[in-house]
Image (cartoon, rainbow, N blue to C red):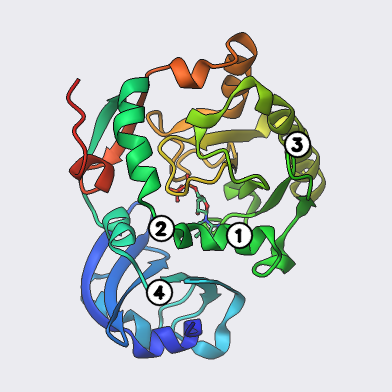
Amino acid sequence: MLTIEEILAKFRFQRILSNDTKAKIVYVLGEVEGQDCILSFEKTQYEDAIISELPIYVDKSSFVDLVENNIYSWCTAALKSNLVDTRIKTIYPATDVHIAKYEAQARVMVIETPALYESNTIAYIKQIPVKRIQWVHNILDGSAEADRVIYHDKDPGTGFVILPDMKWNGSVETLYWVAIAMRSDILSLRSLRSEHLPLLKKLKQKIYELVKEKANLSPNQLRLFIHYQPSYYHFHVHITAVAFTDAPGVVSGQAHLLDTVINNLELYPDYYQRATLPFVIGERHQLLTDYNWDQ
Ligand code: M7G
């Protein structure tokens, strides 16, 4: 694994994947030692003209909050010249899935019946290489981000880790944490059954306690949700501040509120095996390009 410093130094710009001027995040694709690499820079809006030069503007002596986990690393740094306050993330080596995820693209609504889940989504999940969630196992076994973990309940059935999400910029208004289950057999929302209620309820209670203690936010200031489809099929819950109104991934067609999920499971133990679940997905996503969704 290269360090984030080495990645930036060796990065050879190829093209811009996306440039979200509202969220002030740019993703660029390049090569490092012959392998694809994605860098993201997040700040006030960038001029198109400087995007290809960003890696060499980075002031390496200013790195703070450096985290490296498997193929993922990120830090906060100042840029030389008059460019400052930029959050940098690297994904190296980046897969085609990462490139498709961060490339600007139209999104479409897919209606997933239980039958389409069985025929398409399971097949898609099965072909995902296990190393795609190596970063999750690194967190669970303490080999990465150990210093950032806020809470760790190691119970194999109902345990979880709570830590800051890679998307969090550190401010309370934009709070973004993630809770990751210890068990690996819950792939997504679709796997949830009433037998998982003790895990979901314990997790919710602990999140409330910890966010109050560490960020002084009350339960009614929090939005807890589960993505469907997620990017990573190892069960986790997103923890964001309600004040973060345009947090990435809070839209309908993607976010399912934890309270609703708990309620559905209390009403119908197999709700998520029987329900039709619509989801929004990028038109370059493999689930859309490789599978037939006609009903
Ligand atoms: P998701 O719903 O599977 O995917 O959530 P998406 O929201 O990215 O589409 C996975 C969550 O884990 C996201 O909120 C990511 O920002 C976060 N995340 C991803 N990685 C690779 C890491 C990581 O290495 N460390 C931490 N702390 N969070 C991560």
Q: Which residue is mark 3?
A: 208
Closer to the chain start, of discs 4 and 3, is 4
Mark nearest the camera among 2 and 3 is: 2
- Does residue 212 lie above or below 165 as drawn? above
Circles 1 and 4, Cβ within 8 Å, touching? The answer is no
In percent of the image, x 52 and y 16: which residue is there?
A: 271
Circle 2 residue = 129
Q: State whether residue 74 is above or below residue 239.
A: below
Q: CA distance from mark 3 to mark 1?
A: 24 Å
Of mark 3 and mark 1, the one earlier in the sequence is 1
Q: Earlier in the sequence, mark 2 or mark 1?
A: 2
Between the C-alphas of marks 2 and 1, the distance is: 14 Å
The residue located at (60%, 34%) in the rendering is 224
Q: Amino acid at mark 4?
A: Tyr
Q: Are marks 4 and 3 in contact (CB under 8 Å)?
A: no
Which secondary structure, mark 3? helix
Q: Nearer the viewer, residue 231 or 250?
A: 231
Residue 56 lies, with reference to residue 166, above or below; the image says below
Mark toward the start of the polypeptide (2 vs 3): 2
Q: CA distance from mark 1 to mark 4?
A: 18 Å
Q: Secondary structure at mark 4?
A: loop
Q: Amino acid at mark 1?
A: His
Q: Residues within 10 Å of mark 1 (few under 14, many from 20)?
A: some
Q: Say what secondary structure mark 1 lies in.
A: helix
Q: Which numbered mark, 4 or 3, is in the foreground of this view?
A: 4
